[in-house]
Image: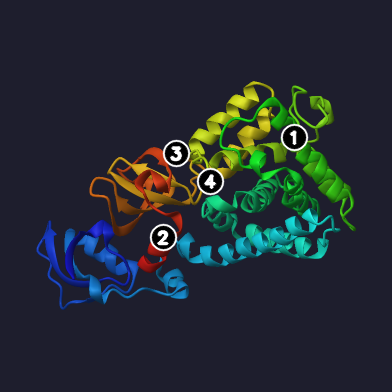
Amino acid sequence: MIIEISIAKLRVGHYVVDIVKQKANYALTQPGHITSNKAIEHLKNKGVETVLIDKSKTKYLTKKQSTSSTTQGSAPLIFDVRKAKEIFDQSKEIQRQVFADAQEGLALDLEPIVDITDKTMVEIFKNSDTLACVINLRNKDEYLLEHSVSVSILMTIFSRFLKIDKTIIQQLAIGAFLHDVGKIKVPSNILNKPAKLTEQEFAIMRTHVNHSINTIEATPGISELSLEVAALHHEKLDGSGYPFNLAAKDISTYGRMIAICDIFDALTAHRCYKKGYSHVKAFTILRNLASKQHLDQRLVDLFIKCMGVYPVGSLVELNSKRVAIVEQRNIEDPISPKVRSFYNVTHHHYVMTEDIDLAHHDDYIVKGVRADDFALDMNKIIEFLLMEG
């Protein structure tokens, strides 16, 4: 299929048939594939504005090819998502076994938990953006499993950002991985109730922390720090948290950190009975909770800085009526990250992707959005982006 596209959308691998609009009088010697970004820059310098491409002849590049041909020297984030998704899925299977063992009253096997949190930590230290992106690929019917895995990932990302020692980070990650294991002891009609819990039901729900503490304490080889993190995830600085109603002075930095990660993931995740909030809305709620002395204000601000105003892997709507996925944060200009557009809001269909550095582009973000705001599925979005290359 031959279509006309702007020079801004021309990519390595496209097959150019002819020039349509230009400011000068430049002519192609012959149709052919774009083999480098230098070729695109050459056309731009010649005043070319739009070209005809034969989409059926587009060459989708391998990661290695893409890396060597991009001016920034790195492939799009989406290429690395598959490996991160494998780690996430492995984590879920280990978490599934953890809950099964806890349900039967068996001692937890710490070795696979150590292995998977170590693998997660290695991936995050290599590129934290990939797992941050995968957290958005969630199954609303597996909230309990995925929440525990995601909080562990968020805790690792946040700890790395704060430059905490790696040996401590792994203990924090293990504690976060196990923080909700006690929920397996809470009756499902209370755990999954779509309406507000009664006082009596909430009292039962609160016992999940005690069950988690008991299970973790009985786990051979577990560290005190891992236990501490799991035990403190529902404590509040004003003393109204549970199960110990601790005062602020008795809640460690690590306990304050996991409270933020736990609430953020709970706010943004879809569940069978409710939709998750956008990341921006979740950040607003975190700040509000900090103003009420439930959370640590300084750590909330650092967490938002760590994740980015528009976190990697989140979706945004642009003023050009397109939806884009955030691929890279911009530290100097947090509201102008690098994104990849893929969907037309007006016409309700996928479009050819375009990589956009919003710090140097006329487009800007109107708001953070969710895939289901447009009846889209996040997994299918990722598949489309991978196909586009």
Q: Quickly name the residue at label 4.
A: 272
Question: Between residues 6 and 317, which one lies in front from this camera angle?
Answer: 317
Distance between mark 3 and mark 2 Cα atoms = 26 Å
Question: Which of disc 2 and disc 4 is earlier in sequence?
Answer: 4
Q: Residue 2's quadrant in the figure?
A: bottom left
Could you tell me if residue 292 is visible in this image? yes
Question: Which of disc 4 and disc 3 is earlier in sequence?
Answer: 4
For residue 375, the mark is none
Distance between mark 1 and mark 3 Cα atoms = 42 Å
Question: Which of disc 2 and disc 3 is earlier in sequence?
Answer: 3
Q: Secondary structure at mark 2?
A: helix
Could you tell me if residue 225 is visible in this image? no
For residue 204, the mark is 1
Q: Amino acid at mark 4?
A: Cys
Distance between mark 3 and mark 4 Cα atoms = 31 Å
Q: Name the spot of residue 200 as percent of width and height, x first.
A: 72, 28
Q: Amino acid at mark 2?
A: Lys
* Mark 4 crowdedness (10 Å alpha carbons): few <14, some 14-19, many ≥20: few
As drawn, 3 above or below 328 = below
Q: Secondary structure at mark 4?
A: loop
* Mark 1 crowdedness (10 Å alpha carbons): few <14, some 14-19, many ≥20: some
Distance between mark 2 and mark 1 Cα atoms = 38 Å
Q: Looking at the image, do the residues carrying marks 3 and 2 touch, with CB atoms under 8 Å apart?
A: no
Question: Which of disc 1 and disc 4 is earlier in sequence?
Answer: 1
Q: Secondary structure at mark 3?
A: loop
Q: Looking at the image, do the residues carrying marks 4 and 1 touch, with CB atoms under 8 Å apart?
A: no
Q: Quickly name the residue at label 3.
A: 335
Q: Which is closer to the viewer, label 3 or label 2?
A: 2
